[in-house]
């Protein structure tokens, strides 16, 4: 891959599409090397959802090493579009919303960005709830009476203490947004080694309690609710869900790599930071949860619940503090940057990155994330697969357009002109997008119960399990054909 950095040669600052947040990052401000990029990924990957990632697969009948291989393979696969889409950020210094103007048109980019951003708002709410829950458990160790705080009614569904901790963590996130993008780099660089240390310490505790890693992993076979299943029927939907886990970031990775010093730095940083961390932290989750079967007589997948069982208030406070930092580092980088930029793209002169972050935060409260998390099965096999279909379609078009059609060449100044060569909607991109998601739509509707699975047949149901792959390759191919027919 070429190493050149292209800078803006024309003054477009008067354009309504231009803002300081969206301006291409000049070479002099490209300060992120491969270790900064790797630290971003470690900081994002080390989180409670990663720790719990194998739970649904093992409960459905996979053994521990099958689940681990599925997680590793999914992350190696998603690393490919991740690196490909990162290229434009490093070469031209632009964030995702500006890149989408190239692929979907100046006007179409607003909708394409919102499709990515609104998903992240849901994730932001969930991660904020998890971080607040860790604070709540930490305070319970010091003030047990907090559990009896005022119940806020069935509509809210939680007590005052839980809601207060949720809002406290929400305000911490908003403060990081207020401080700006460079504070995210500092947070991730500082948090990454600390977070890995917390995970290793938890693994060490479980190993010491049980006495043997082999015994711990043998106990993992007790986690499966059903062992008489066809492995391949679990594997493909699970692999799609694993790809879907970071399919969001595979789109807006230019938001970060626009600060990278070179293509080599962004490629090596991502390869070092993503697949290995995801597999390692998922392994810790598997091993420690397996140990809880032997130690407590029950499987405890949620580390917040597990750490709450420790008798030492000091241990609980330190561990929960680690989980709070883990969740904060993931939440800011993975779930705030993309929607903040997407909302800002609606009116760049009026909505800043900071204001976009505040909008994200408000939506994160309004979705009542504690209710979204009530069904873990739906969270993994409905949500992750469903939105991976949309994101696969976007990714296929973006990669085909940038690499195959345009050969990585674009007119930087034209991306900021309302009447330029990228104006309006790129119809071919939107036709390819819609056509690519049609084959997986029946499977989605059957999965959520809108129609019966029997009415659409086994083929379409199984096709839905491959959603990201189906929409990615279909959108790529359809867009290529439509562009060649011009």
Image (cartoon, rainbow, N blue to C red):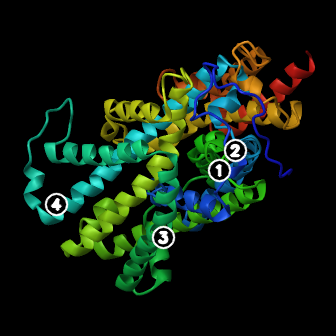
Q: Earlier in the sequence, mark 4 or mark 1?
A: 1
Element type at mark 1: helix
Q: Residue at x 62, y 22 (%)?
A: 17
Q: Is residue 56 visible?
A: no
Q: CA distance from mark 4 to mark 3?
A: 25 Å
Q: CA distance from mark 2 to mark 4?
A: 48 Å
Element type at mark 4: helix
Q: Which mark is residue 135?
A: none
Where does label 4 land, which residue? 140
Q: Is residue 74 visible?
A: yes
Q: CA distance from mark 2 to mark 1?
A: 6 Å
Q: Position of residue 250 (x, y in %)?
A: 65, 44
Q: Earlier in the sequence, mark 2 or mark 4?
A: 2
Where does label 2 land, which residue? 26
- Residue 141 lies, with reference to residue 405, above or below; the image says below
Q: Earlier in the sequence, mark 2 or mark 3?
A: 2
Asked whether the residues under the numbered discs 2 and 4 touch, taking CB atoms below 8 Å apart as contact, a structural biologist would say no
Q: Which mark is residue 29?
A: 1
Lateral position of residue 61 relative to residue 9, left or right: left
Lateral position of residue 96 relative to residue 478, left or right: left
Asked whether the residues under the numbered discs 2 and 1 touch, taking CB atoms below 8 Å apart as contact, a structural biologist would say yes
- The crowd level at tag 3 (other Cα within 10 Å; few <14, some 14-19, many 20+) is some
Q: Nearer the viewer, residue 443 or 51?
A: 51
Q: Nearer the viewer, residue 278 or 54?
A: 278
């Amino acid at each position: 891959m070429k190493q050149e950095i292209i800078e803006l040669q024309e003054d477009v600052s008067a354009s309504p599409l231009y803002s300081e947040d969206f301006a291409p990052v000049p070479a002099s401000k490209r300060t992120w090397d491969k270790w900064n990029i790797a630290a971003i990924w470690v900081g994002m990957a080390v989180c409670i959802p990663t720790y719990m990632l194998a739970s649904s697969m093992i409960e459905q009948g996979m053994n521990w090493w099958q689940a681990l291989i599925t997680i590793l393979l999914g992350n190696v696969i998603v690393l490919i579009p991740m690196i490909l889409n990162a290229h434009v950020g490093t070469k031209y210094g632009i964030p995702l919303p500006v890149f989408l103007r190239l692929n979907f048109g100046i006007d179409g980019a607003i909708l394409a960005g919102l499709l990515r951003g609104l998903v992240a708002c849901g994730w932001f709410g969930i991660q904020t709830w998890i971080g607040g829950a860790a604070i709540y458990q930490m305070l319970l160790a010091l003030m047990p009476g907090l559990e009896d705080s005022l119940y806020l009614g069935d509509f809210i569904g939680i007590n005052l203490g839980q809601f207060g901790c949720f809002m406290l963590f929400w305000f911490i996130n908003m403060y990081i947004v207020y401080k700006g993008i460079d504070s995210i780099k500092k947070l991730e660089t500082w948090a990454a080694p600390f977070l890995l240390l917390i995970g290793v310490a938890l693994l060490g505790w479980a190993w010491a309690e049980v006495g043997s890693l082999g015994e711990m992993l043998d106990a993992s076979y007790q986690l499966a609710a059903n062992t008489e299943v066809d492995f391949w029927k679990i594997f493909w939907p699970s692999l799609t869900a694993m790809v879907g886990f970071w399919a969001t970031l595979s789109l807006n990775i230019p938001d970060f790599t626009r600060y990278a010093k070179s293509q080599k730095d962004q490629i090596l940083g991502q390869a070092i930071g993503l697949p290995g961390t995801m597999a390692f932290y998922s392994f810790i989750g598997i091993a420690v949860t397996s140990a809880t079967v032997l130690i407590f007589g029950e499987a405890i997948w949620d580390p917040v619940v597990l750490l709450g069982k420790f008798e030492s208030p000091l241990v609980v406070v330190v561990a929960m503090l680690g989980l709070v930092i883990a969740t904060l580092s993931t939440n800011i980088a993975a779930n705030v940057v993309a929607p903040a930029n997407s909302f800002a793209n609606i009116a760049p002169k009026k909505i800043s990155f900071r204001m976009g972050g505040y909008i994200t935060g408000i939506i994160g409260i309004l979705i009542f994330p504690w209710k979204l998390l009530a069904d873990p099965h739906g969270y993994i096999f409905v949500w992750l697969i469903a939105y991976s279909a949309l994101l696969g379609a976007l990714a296929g078009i973006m990669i085909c357009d940038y690499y195959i059609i345009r050969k990585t060449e674009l007119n930087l100044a034209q991306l900021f002109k309302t009447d330029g060569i990228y104006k309006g909607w790129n119809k071919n991109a939107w036709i390819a997008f819609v056509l690519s998601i049609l084959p997986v739509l029946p499977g989605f509707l059957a999965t959520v119960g809108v129609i019966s699975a029997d009415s659409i047949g086994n083929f379409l149901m199984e096709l839905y399990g491959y959603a990201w792959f189906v929409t990615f390759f279909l959108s790529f191919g359809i867009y290529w054909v439509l562009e060649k027919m011009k």
